[in-house]
């Protein structure tokens, strides 16, 4: 049952809100769900309801709820914006935001246009790095353009590096730091 699964997901994410508050974290990240959804309008209605319930907890504990572009409903940046706008209309601007991930876009989606739509709400950013060679070339997409877009949209926080390449993870992160640091 989808409602049962959704309620369980809200409860599971909700458990982390007071924990985040206790350890001094300012936000948690929650997925939108909706993998394989057929009725996008119903999916958005359910997603908005779920994020409003999480926002109730976030408001109570002073913790923001962040949406990452991470599959399902969030594969379309317009859906992310719709959820953000709906929750902000009832809970205010500080309780919900985005966690844009440079890499989490399907190949048929314009990564840069999509980022511009969700970056204005960013409270954190994932600088996803895929295969990066010894010369710090990152052929999958333009990291510098992604960083520039984040800055242009007003984001000036940390970039969390997520390495998902095929080489050694420590080497991949080390190269990512070397590539990204001059861009900051």
Image (cartoon, helix red, strand yellow):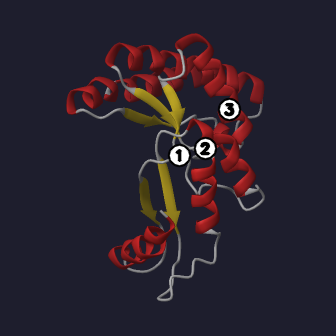
Q: Mark 2 or mark 3: which comes first in sequence?
A: 3
Q: Nearer the viewer, residue 61 or 5?
A: 61
**Hey, which quadrant is residue 11 in on the image?**
top left
Q: Mark 3 or mark 1: which comes first in sequence?
A: 3
Task: Name the image quarter holding the N terminus.
Answer: top right
- Mark 2 lies on residue: 119
Give the residue furthest to the left: 23
In this view, the mark in front (2 or 3) = 2
* Residue 71: numbered disc: none
The percent coordinates of residue 156 (x first, y second) are 48, 48
Q: Mark 1 or mark 2: which comes first in sequence?
A: 2
Q: Secondary structure at mark 3?
A: helix
| Side of 22 relative to 69 (left or right) | left
Question: Disc 3 and disc 1: Cα gap in Å?
Answer: 17 Å
In this view, the mark in front (3 or 1) = 1
| Side of 71 relative to 41 (left or right) | left
Q: Are marks 1 and 2 in contact (CB under 8 Å)?
A: yes
The percent coordinates of residue 62 (x first, y second) are 35, 20
Q: Residues within 10 Å of mark 1 (few under 14, many from 20)?
A: some
Q: Is residue 35 at least partly visible in the picture?
A: no
Q: Are marks 3 and 1 in contact (CB under 8 Å)?
A: no
Q: Residues within 10 Å of mark 2 (few under 14, many from 20)?
A: many
The percent coordinates of residue 141 (x first, y second) are 65, 69
Question: Disc 2 and disc 3: Cα gap in Å?
Answer: 10 Å
Residue beneath the point at 32% across and 18% down: 61
Q: Nearer the viewer, residue 155 or 101?
A: 155
- Mark 3 lies on residue: 81
> Where 46 sits versus 141, above or below?
above
In this view, the mark in front (1 or 2) = 1
Q: Nearer the viewer, residue 23 or 159?
A: 159
- Mark 1 lies on residue: 155
The percent coordinates of residue 46 (x first, y second) are 63, 21
């Amino acid at each position: 049952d989808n409602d049962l699964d959704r309620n369980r997901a809200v409860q599971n994410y909700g458990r982390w809100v007071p924990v985040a508050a206790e350890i001094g974290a300012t936000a948690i990240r929650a997925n939108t769900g909706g993998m394989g959804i057929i009725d996008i309008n119903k999916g958005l209605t359910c997603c908005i309801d779920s994020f409003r319930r999480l926002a109730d907890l976030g408001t109570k504990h002073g913790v923001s709820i962040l949406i990452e572009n991470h599959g399902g409903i969030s594969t379309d940046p317009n859906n992310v914006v719709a959820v953000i706008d709906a929750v902000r209309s009832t809970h205010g601007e500080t309780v919900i935001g985005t966690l844009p991930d440079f890499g989490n876009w399907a190949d048929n989606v314009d990564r840069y246009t999509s980022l511009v739509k969700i970056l204005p709400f960013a409270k954190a950013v994932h600088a996803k790095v895929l295969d990066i060679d010894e010369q710090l070339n990152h052929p999958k997409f333009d990291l510098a353009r992604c960083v520039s877009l984040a800055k242009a949209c007003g984001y000036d926080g940390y970039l969390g590096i997520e390495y998902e390449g095929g080489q050694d993870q420590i080497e991949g992160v080390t190269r990512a730091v070397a590539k990204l640091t001059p861009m900051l």
